Amino acid sequence: MEAKIISRFRGSPFAFPLAAAAALAMFFISETSYQQAASSLESLKLTDTAHTAIQTLRRDLADAETSQRGYLLTGRKEYLTPYHAATTEVETTLDTLRRHYDPDKAGADLMQHVETVTRAKLSELDTTLRLYGEGNSDAWHELLMSNIGKEQMDSVRSLSEQLLQLESARIKAGRQSIDQTLRLSRIGITAMTALSLLALFMYLRKTNALDRQREEHQRRVEAERDQLEQKVLRRTAQLTELTRHLQTVREDERNRLARELHDELGALLTAAKLDLARLRSRLGATTPEVVERLAHLNEALNNGIALKRRIVEDLWPSALSNLGLVATLEILL
């Protein structure tokens, strides 16, 4: 029965046109599927490039900030080499992202915010270095200790995370488009099952390779981020120790100056007052002008002794050494 049907089909005048139409249909479906798959893969490639550029932007900003902190801590200009390299790379990355998101209205608006915050962060870093170079210690230290830099970095992280979510959505849409294309190709080209399976295998292998590359890149970024966090913690500990040391040195110097004023200047003023008392006792009753001068000199010595005591108390309160910190604070309150 089957042989008879096949024989009739071969002898039919419509066999070749139907076969040709089927071949043309399969060719059209195959070509359409190929074009759609190629477009989706190119879109995935661009999306992966944008994803990498966003991660690079965050890393370069962190490198620039770390390099700046190292230079401010040490004053060594070699620490600025990574800073200049990172800022140059940031400009290149911003240009790449700008070209990528220019056709996309939502992405372009978000990218504009990212660029604005990034340039604000670079301006803050550059301003701190400029104030440091001008020797304006109070200004650059106050700018460094403020929350401006942290808020800007948080904004960069938040906006870049939104861009990453946008790219992830595009990757998902691209994968869905590829899946639909593959399903259409498998339905339309039943006679080319082997080639379809081979194409699917090659596609899956490529996708797995991209996933492994992306995971490896993510691991490297996380390792670099952990290293940067450790560096920040070490720098923070060093700054804390330096601040504590400077505070101790300042307190020791105030204590030493207070002791010298109390011992040396107090002894001189006391000796002068004793000498004045001896002069007054020996002169006895004398002219009113001399008596007035002696009284004025005695008042000046008393004022000098009072001033000395007040300065010593301001430098190092005696209650702090004798009664302790709590009692001294209660007295001051």
Image (cartoon, rainbow, N blue to C red):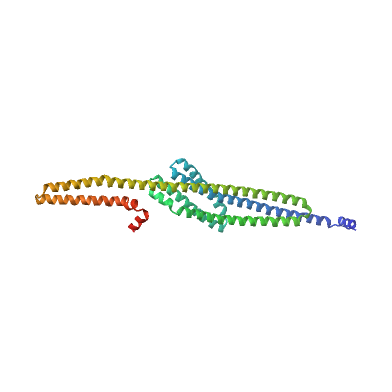
- Visible in this render: residue 148? yes
Question: Residue 252, how many percent across, how many down?
Answer: 35, 46
Question: Residue 199, how many percent across, how many down?
Answer: 72, 50
Which quadrant is home to the C terminus? Answer: bottom left
Question: Residue 280, how many percent across, how many down?
Answer: 14, 48
At x 19% / y 52%, what residue is drawn?
A: 299
Which quadrant is home to the N terminus? Answer: bottom right
| Along the viewing direction, whichever of 98 and 309 lies nearer the viewer | 309
At x 63% / y 52%, what residue is drawn?
A: 44
At x 75% / y 53%, what residue is drawn?
A: 27
- In the rendered view, tell whether residue 114 sits above or below residue 271: below
Q: Is residue 281 left or right of residue 74?
A: left
Question: Residue 303, how many percent across, how many down?
Answer: 22, 52
- Visible in this render: residue 90? no
| Along the viewing direction, whichever of 74 and 61 lies nearer the viewer | 74
| Along the viewing direction, whichever of 209 and 13 lies nearer the viewer | 209
Count the numbered circles shown: 0
Q: Is residue 282 left or right of residue 61?
A: left
At x 11% / y 47%, what residue is drawn?
A: 283
